[in-house]
Amino acid sequence: MIHAKQVVKKFGSMRAVDDVSFELGASESLALWGSNGAGKTTLIRCLLGIFPFAGQATINGHDAQQSGKLARALVGYVPQELSFHDDARLGRSIQFFAKLRGKRKTDATRVLEMVDLQGHESKRVRDLSGGMKQRLALAIALIADPPVIMLDEPTSNLDASGRQEVVDTLSRLRETGKTLLFASHRPDEVHTLASRVLVLERGKLVRDVTPKELWPTHRSLQTIRLHTNEDNDDQAASVLRQAGLTVNLNGHGLCVSVPHNRKGEPMTLLAQASIGVRDFEILEELKPIESHDFADCPIDTLATSNQSHGDQP
């Protein structure tokens, strides 16, 4: 369904996406994983033909750049930042976006039913919860019944209840045969929705694995940001990965995910490799999505925990 070959996107001299290739079959679900700045959003925008890029990307055989309109017609896209008219009612919002997509006659109730918002047609957008707004965005993406759904951090700004609502909706859509490609920073969300994970780091694809391969333990996970002496992050990441730990680099230290009862292990491994750690921060641990024993690992959000050390940015 989606084929990307040697995709490169530069902003000046910086390679935001650096020679990324992968394939995603119909009805499969793929998560893009990595810290802020890893290239997740940029890669999605390249696949949509929003950004010009080097290399090739196709959706069901349609080139994302040369036949962008045909390619995008197959995709329902939900961006990270939502924009609605607060005074608009849900039913009319569906009709408005349907007209933009060339669908003159659209049953708003049917579309809203796909995301469990039926009965709210007359409600104003401003009266919706965060989870309901996200499901409205998903309903709009589904107006033309596209075979592919792309989402950029679909639950990043939601509370636990809102996250559960969105993940449950996406799970049902996946079961109907939709192809999912989404960026996420939550292990529990990835485990629930994805069959494969592309791990991106500084624009490069460093691993193509299953969620279980990325997080083999079913214990609660904690993420720690480490700052090495002499900014020796690349060598430190190599040592920790060889020990089987999940590591992300983004130019602001390295983030490593460990079982909750093994938080000291990364420092021990690095000390054995003669790599000094000048500072560390324990990142916020949130309640996992229901039915999974995976705690949240928000890579780029610092905790307010009194266990944190060093200056807060």
Image (cartoon, rainbow, N blue to C red):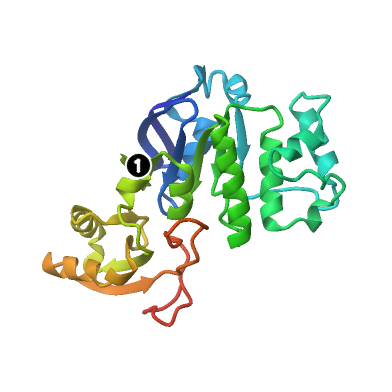
Q: Amino acid at mark 1?
A: Thr
Query: For this rendering, which residue is in front, 242 or 276?
Result: 242
In the image, residue 20 above or below residue 80: above
Where in the figure is residue 284, as x and y percent of width and height?
A: 45, 69
In the image, residue 177 above or below residue 266: above
Where in the figure is residue 175, as x and y percent of width and height?
A: 54, 35
Pointer 1: what residue?
Answer: 210
Query: For this rendering, which residue is in front, 131 or 227?
Result: 131
At mark 1, the secondary structure is loop
In the image, residue 46 above or below residue 135: above
Query: For this rendering, which residue is in front, 77 or 11?
Result: 77
Where in the figure is residue 311, as x and y percent of width and height?
A: 41, 78
In the image, residue 190 above or below residue 145: below
Q: Which residue is at a point 23% across and 54% down the rendered structure image?
A: 244
Where in the figure is residue 40, as x and y percent of width and height?
A: 46, 44
Q: Quadrant of residue 36?
A: bottom left
Q: Which residue is at a point 20% across and 54% down the rendered structure image?
A: 238
